[in-house]
Image (tube, grey):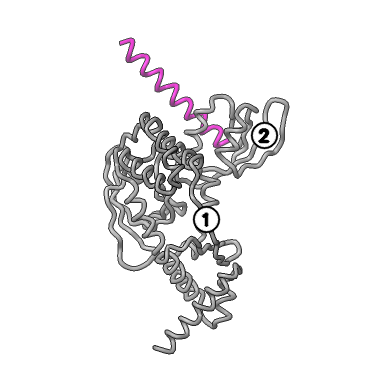
Amino acid sequence: MKGESMDKAERILLVFCRLLKHEWLNKTNLALEFNTTERTIERDMQSIRAVLSEARSPAVLLWDRQKGSYILNHYQHRPLQSMEALTILKILLGSRALRLDEMEGLVQALCGLLSPRDEMEFSRLLEEELDGYREPSHHQAIIKTQWDLQQCIRDHRKICLHYSRGDDMRTAHIVFPLSVVVSDGYFYLIATVEGTIHKEPAFFRLDRIRSFDVLPGNGCSPEDNDFSLRRLRSTTPFMFGGNPVRLTLRCQHRAAEALFDKIPAHTVLSWEEETVLVEVTVSIPGFFRWLLMQGDAIVIIGPDRFRQAFIQTLQQIQNAYTDSKEDCLT
């Protein structure tokens, strides 16, 4: 056992020294080089991450899935400037994603990163910026919940999620957390759900999570499955589940920027005098909701079944307004 421990320590030290030289280290090649398994190399990298975290190192050990390799990124510390802090503050306040007390705590932490001179200047701006802040209507604390979930993601732990839907129906799900993201003013947990036929991850708003229990044992690592946050973001920017589908859209020039910003992974098929033909890959439920806000500026060209599905959605909205008009008359 002692020999194995020394071998492990020596292996980790050698790997760490190469990381310090800013080398890309391929997981498969490392396993072959040290006559061990790829899973062992993953555990070695987790040990290195733990040491970096405990030492509060500015360096971050990154995993590139496409290369199948690790690299150590080095970051140089410098005092935050007041104009940078003000920019971060406006982004935070504009998100309206946090309760007022949590927002104030973050702002104070932000002040602590400034030089004494910049902190005085920044403090004068705070009262005016915070005065108009309106916290979200759910009034739920978010920071600790997202941190606890992040630890489950880091440790590859499966959890039992106690969740309250938008209609107040309470449900329980066994899930494997993959990521926590922020979108349109809400924090979301992205997770695969156990016991469901759907292969795509599900989205859970953090403010609707009543509690969660960490289950014994480990799930699979994101490095071991085909989950990619970048790919998910490109096809599911609306935080609604569903299988991604490919659509062809005709977009008026005035709405093209909004479309391109919302769905960065688009393909321009052709530019015309007044419109642009664009191909996108999206999940339907969230995309339809966003498309309704665009009026006649963006139109689905095909496939026809999705065009007809959107037309049916429009008809349902029209019927709802027709029914409500009759109620008013009676």
Q: Which residue is mark 2?
A: 277
Q: In this orientation, does residue 117 appear?
A: yes
Picture quadrant where residue 14 is located: bottom right
Q: Quadrant of the C terminus?
A: top left
Q: In this orientation, does residue 239 appear?
A: no
Of residue 47 and residue 239, the one placed in the foreground of this image is 47
Of residue 70 and residue 281, the one placed in the foreground of this image is 70
Expressed as whole percent of the image width and height from the top left, the position of residue 100 reads: 32, 38
Write down the region rendered in magenta: 304-330
Which type of secondary structure does the marked residue at label 1 adopt? Answer: loop
Type of amino acid at the residue the image marks with label 2:
Leu
Q: Say whether residue 214 is left or right of residue 153.
A: left
Expressed as whole percent of the image width and height from the top left, the position of residue 68 reads: 58, 66
Residue at left offset 36%, top offset 63%: 157
Q: Main secondary structure of the magenta part?
A: helix
Point out which mark residue 55 bears: none
Expressed as whole percent of the image width and height from the top left, the position of residue 186 reads: 40, 41
Of residue 22 and residue 244, the one placed in the foreground of this image is 22
Q: Residues within 10 Å of mark 1 (few under 14, many from 20)?
A: some
Residue at left offset 36%, top offset 18%: 324
Type of amino acid at the residue the image marks with label 1:
Ser
Picture quadrant where residue 275 is located: top right
Residue at left offset 56%, top offset 62%: 65
Q: Which residue is mark 1?
A: 228
